[in-house]
Image (cartoon, rainbow, N blue to C red):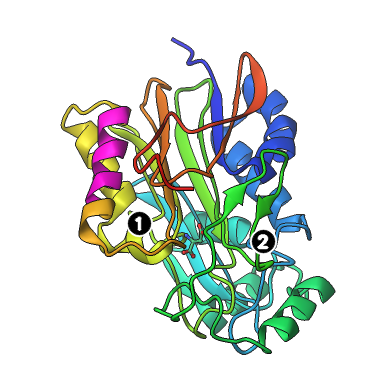
């Protein structure tokens, strides 16, 4: 029986990309094409300073991109620390489709992109460079992959396509999950990582099982937020494995987020949101703290939604 297609993405900056990807998915297109298209559109948007072109650089001023795609445990692909090519999700898809490998890193990933004929491009926008130069005046401010001793507020979704950071910097992976008419689940993630990160730092987003996991039998899950928290507990794999054992997406996501809440000494900047989807298309999204939003496309159209639940609701 044909499935009822669905597309869910993280953060309201994915609203237009989801609305544009939806008609093809609704009309029988592939879910993998849909999640790739959503990520590519966000990667292309210079106004999003945490994904693709325009993403904020590392401490030394270099923009590096991470991304992955997954259909099932035998079909996944990933790239990290890409420095010369602007579409990490498309590159990750080529790793999945054209190599026997799962993950290519750094110069090797860029060389593979060259071999595949992908166009090189400068990744640092004028605006991102200007922000980096400003950050260099107060360099202890942001690198959320370290305990930097300074506590900016965590990202809060404006609900209108932007994510607000009082200090003008942020970090948000675009993560997308889809179910297509053939009943195939697919997922993709793309990020430039935490702003002003320690050079070489890679977060959860491109790592299969951490930022994304898809199993056709059990379901799919993907995470955005402070990568180090997600990585400590293999959160996407954890959610899917719970669903394999019979948990609802709600129970699986909330259990994973509570594990993060209880395992870490959380600082105000920390945020994690996880979305999950069953093979039948039931979905659930929750965040550790307020401020996160999802974008959903289904037969009712495309809309920005609040998470179904927030684990630490009082904090803002
Ligand atoms: N999870 C990503 C990372 O840690 C960034 C984010 O989603 O905010 O690299």
Q: Report which residue position mark 2 lands on.
A: 87
Segment tinted magenta in the rendering: 250-259
Element assignment for label 1 = loop
- Note whether 302 is above or below 295 in the view shown: above
Whole-angstrom CA distance, mark 1 to mark 2, is 20 Å
Query: Are circles 1 and 2 on residues that touch, CB within 8 Å?
Result: no
Q: Residue at x 63, y 86 (%)?
A: 138
Q: Residue at x 79, y 79 (%)?
A: 130
Q: Position of residue 261 (x, y in %)?
A: 27, 52
Q: Is residue 106 above or below residue 285?
A: below
Viewer-proximal residue, 199 or 113? Answer: 199
Of the numbered discs 1 and 2, the one sitting upstream in the chain is 2
98 w.r.t. 125: above or below: above
Residue at left 48%, top 83%?
200
Instruction: Report the side of 94 relative to 12 (left or right).
Output: left
Q: Residue at x 27, y 54 (%)?
A: 260
Label 2's element? loop
**Magenta span includes 13:** no
Check residue 271 in the rendering and tell me which mark sits there, or answer none.
Answer: none
Residue 132, position in %: x, y?
70, 81
Q: Quadrant of residue 264?
A: bottom left
Judge by depth and name the residue closer to the eye, 99 or 122. 122
Q: Main SS type for the magenta part?
A: helix
Q: Quadrant of residue 113?
A: bottom right
Residue indicated by mark 1: 210
The image position of residue 139, as x and y in percent, is 59, 87
Q: Is residue 102 visible?
A: no
**Which of the 4 image quadrants contains residue 66?**
bottom right
């Amino acid at each position: 029986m044909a499935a009822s297609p669905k597309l869910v993405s993280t953060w309201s900056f994915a609203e237009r990309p989801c609305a544009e990807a939806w008609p093809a998915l609704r009309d029988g297109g592939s879910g993998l094409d849909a999640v790739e298209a959503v990520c590519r559109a966000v990667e292309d948007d210079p106004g999003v300073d945490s994904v693709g072109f325009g993403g904020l650089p590392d401490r030394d001023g270099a923009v590096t991109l991470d991304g992955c795609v997954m259909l099932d445990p035998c079909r996944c692909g990933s790239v990290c620390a890409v420095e010369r090519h602007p579409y990490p999700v498309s590159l990750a898809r080529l790793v999945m489709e054209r190599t026997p490998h799962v993950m290519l890193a750094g110069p090797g990933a860029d060389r593979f992109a060259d071999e595949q004929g992908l166009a090189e491009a400068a990744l640092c926008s004028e605006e991102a460079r200007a922000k980096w130069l400003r950050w260099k005046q107060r360099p202890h401010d942001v690198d959320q992959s370290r305990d930097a001793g300074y506590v900016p507020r965590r990202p809060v979704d404006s609900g209108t396509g932007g994510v607000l950071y009082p200090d003008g910097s942020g970090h948000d992976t675009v993560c997308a999950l889809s179910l297509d008419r053939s009943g195939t689940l697919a997922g993709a993630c793309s990020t430039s990582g935490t702003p002003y990160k320690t050079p070489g730092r890679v977060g959860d987003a491109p790592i299969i099982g951490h930022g994304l996991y898809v199993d056709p039998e059990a379901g799919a899950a993907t995470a955005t937020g402070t990568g180090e928290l997600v990585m400590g507990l293999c959160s996407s794999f954890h959610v899917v494995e719970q669903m394999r054992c019979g948990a609802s997406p709600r129970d699986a996501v909330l259990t994973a987020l509570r594990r993060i809440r209880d395992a870490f000494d959380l600082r105000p900047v920390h945020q994690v949101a996880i979305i999950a989807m069953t093979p039948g298309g039931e979905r659930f999204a929750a965040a550790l703290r307020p401020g996160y939003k999802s974008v959903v496309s289904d037969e009712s159209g495309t809309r920005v939604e609040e998470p179904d639940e927030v684990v630490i609701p009082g904090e803002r």
